[in-house]
Image (cartoon, rainbow, N blue to C red):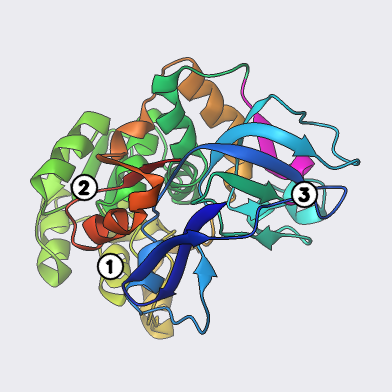
Amino acid sequence: MKGTVLHGAHDVRFEDREDPRIEKPTDAVIRIALSCVCGSDLWSYRGIQKIDQPVAMGHEYCGVVEEVGSAVKSVKPGQFVVGSFFASDNTCAHCRLGYQSSCQHREFFGSAQAPFLRVPLADGTLVPTPGIPTESSIPSLLASSDVLGTGWFAAEAAEVKPGKTVVVVGDGAVGLLAVLSARQMKAERIITMSRHQTRQTLAREFGATDIVTERGDEGVARIKELTKGVGADSVLECVGTQESMMQAIKSTRPGGHVSYVGVPHNMTLNGEQLFFSHIHLHGGPAPVRRYLPKLIEMVWTEKIQPGKVFDLELPLDQVAEGYRAMDERRAIKALLRP
């Protein structure tokens, strides 16, 4: 088969790759219905996260089970499934506490920008949908496999509750779906930091009540102004840079909560500053598997439509354009159709 391979900075190719197959009794092979480009893929695409050899790309996926290993019991061929970017057994001590992305047997696999995908630890990783979904709902199911689950974790980790004031730092797909998640958790006020009109419009559709265009200390000052000098109860950091993290911390009231789900790059935190800020910090790779059953149900019953973050659709063999469009911020998130 052909699939996406990153050879170096700005060098994405659609080329021959080995067909996935069952390698262990706990594996499954699925036929991809849709895949996409993730904002975190851009770190490697831009050369910020170095690679020393060609790398198969893609970690967001949904599709139909083609084949299962002899030990797989919870999914079967013909079922439509959604999975997380971390394979997990969903039974170890960490999984039982809801942190499947820290599973003691976890595997990260990134080769979903292709027609077929091998999924390790299929019983713990894949969640079947109630039936075969409608074509129109598949993008939202795909969003559940990462960006929605990550946005949901951002809101939960920052203790978003009814009546709270929430700030979302980042207007990519994760940030926008963090807005949606905060609205579902009944936050009273949701302030989105964004400078892009199309993203602002979608943020408001998902539940944002205020838009802040300022950045850095000016952005912090604007948040303080909007909150009468107090700061936000919950701040969701969805970027992963030094500037975005400091903006999040400084925008939070004493006793408030900051979540961080953007993959950090060149970030350092000042221990003394944290000590005197009296804020709570929680984040990391989102345990998407924890939320998948709930998120799938919400999509299935049309309570939410997270697939609206996909504003560019391409055939899979044009994947390089998807990377370019997201890198240049011409697209929020590129949908790839095999």
The three-letter amino acid code for the residue at tag 1 is: Ser
332 or 29, nearer to the observer: 29
Quote the CA–CA distance across marks 1 and 3.
Answer: 35 Å
Quote the CA–CA distance across marks 1 and 2.
Answer: 13 Å
Which circle marks residue 304 in the picture? none
Dot 1 or dot 2, earlier in sequence: 2
Q: What residue did someone put label 2 on?
A: 192
Question: The magenta stretch spans which residues?
Answer: 120-129
The reply to whether the magenta stretch includes residue 191 is no
Dot 1 or dot 3, earlier in sequence: 3
Image coords of residue 41 (percent x, y)? 41, 63
Quote the CA–CA distance across marks 2 and 3.
Answer: 37 Å
Q: What secondary structure is found at the residue carrying circle 1?
A: helix
Q: Residue furthest right?
A: 70
Residue occupying the point 78% across, 62% down = 104
Counting the numbered discs, the total is: 3
Residue occupying the point 76% across, 37% down = 67
| Residue 201 in view in this figure | yes
